Image (spheres, rainbow, N blue to C red):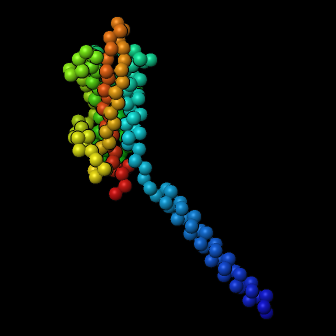
C-alpha cells in the first residue's frame, strides 16, 4: 500500500513540474515573439545606401543626375521599388519619401540638384520628431562627398523618410 500512495504523490509532483515548465516555455516564447520590432530607421538607412550607390560609384558622381529625365525616372534607374503590401490602405498612401540635394563645395546654400519622390506629407514628421511621437514617420539623413568628372567637389545630402507605423509601432 505504501508504494501505491508514493507513486500517486510523485505523479502529482511530476504533473505540477511539467505544467510549470510548459508555462515557462510559453511565457518565454510570448515575450520573445510578442514584441514588434521597429525597423523603420534601418529601412531608411538601407534606402539612403541604395540611393547613394546610384548617385555616386567609388566616389565619382554619376553625371546623369543633373538631367531632368534621369531625375524623373529615378526609381526605375536606381532599381527602387516603393510598392508596399496592402495593409491599412497603404496602397493609396505612399509610405516612403526621399529628397536629394547636391551642392557644389563652394556654394553650400543653393543646391545644384534638388529633387524628391514620395509622399510630401511625411516631411512634417521630421520637424516634430521625438520619443513622444513614435507613431510618426522615421527620418534618416545621410551626407557624403563626391567628385565629378572634372574633379569638381560635391556635397550630397539625402533625406529618407519611412512611415509604415501601423506595422512597426506597437500600440
Residue 22 against residue 12 in the figure, above or below: above
Q: Is residue 7 above or below residue 84?
A: below
Q: Is residue 90 visible?
A: yes
On the image, which quarter does residue 105 sit in?
A: top left
Q: Quadrant of the C terminus?
A: bottom left
Q: Which residue is more in the foreground, 91 or 1?
A: 1
Q: Is residue 28 left or right of residue 35?
A: right
Task: Reply above or below: 146 against 133.
Answer: above
Q: Residue furthest left?
A: 110
Residue at 60% from the left image edge and 73% from the top image edge: 19
Query: How far from the left and from the top, in percent, is residue 34?
Result: 46, 58
The residue under the point 61% across, 69% down is 21
Position of residue 115 measured from the top left corner of the image (x, y, whole percent): 25, 25
Instruction: Kindly give the residue lying farthest to the bottom in the view shown.
Output: 1
Quadrant in the rendering for residue 164: top left
Res 58 quadrant in image: top left
- In the image, farthest residue toward the front: 106
Expressed as whole percent of the image width and height from the top left, the position of residue 62 reads 36, 15
Q: Is residue 69 visible?
A: no
| Nearest the eye: 108 or 43 | 108
Residue found at x 40% / y 47%:
38
Q: Quadrant of the N terminus?
A: bottom right
Q: Position of residue 67 (x, y in %)?
A: 28, 15
In this view of the protein, which residue sits in the foreground, 155 or 72? 155
Amino acid at each position: 500500500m505504501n508504494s501505491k500512495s508514493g507513486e500517486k504523490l510523485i505523479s502529482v509532483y511530476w504533473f505540477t513540474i511539467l505544467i510549470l515548465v510548459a508555462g515557462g516555455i510559453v511565457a518565454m516564447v510570448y515575450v520573445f515573439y510578442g514584441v514588434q520590432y521597429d525597423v523603420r530607421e534601418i529601412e531608411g538607412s538601407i534606402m539612403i545606401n541604395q540611393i547613394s550607390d546610384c548617385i555616386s560609384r567609388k566616389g565619382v558622381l554619376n553625371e546623369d543626375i543633373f538631367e531632368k529625365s534621369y531625375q524623373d525616372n529615378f526609381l526605375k534607374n536606381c532599381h527602387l521599388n516603393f510598392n508596399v503590401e496592402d495593409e491599412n490602405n497603404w496602397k493609396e498612401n505612399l509610405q516612403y519619401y526621399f529628397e536629394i540635394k547636391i551642392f557644389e563645395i563652394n556654394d553650400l546654400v543653393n543646391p545644384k540638384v534638388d529633387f524628391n519622390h514620395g509622399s510630401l506629407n511625411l516631411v512634417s514628421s521630421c520637424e516634430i520628431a521625438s520619443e513622444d511621437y513614435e507613431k510618426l514617420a522615421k527620418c534618416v539623413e545621410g551626407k557624403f562627398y563626391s567628385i565629378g568628372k572634372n574633379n569638381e567637389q560635391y556635397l550630397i545630402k539625402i533625406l529618407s523618410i519611412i512611415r509604415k507605423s501601423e506595422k512597426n509601432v506597437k500600440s
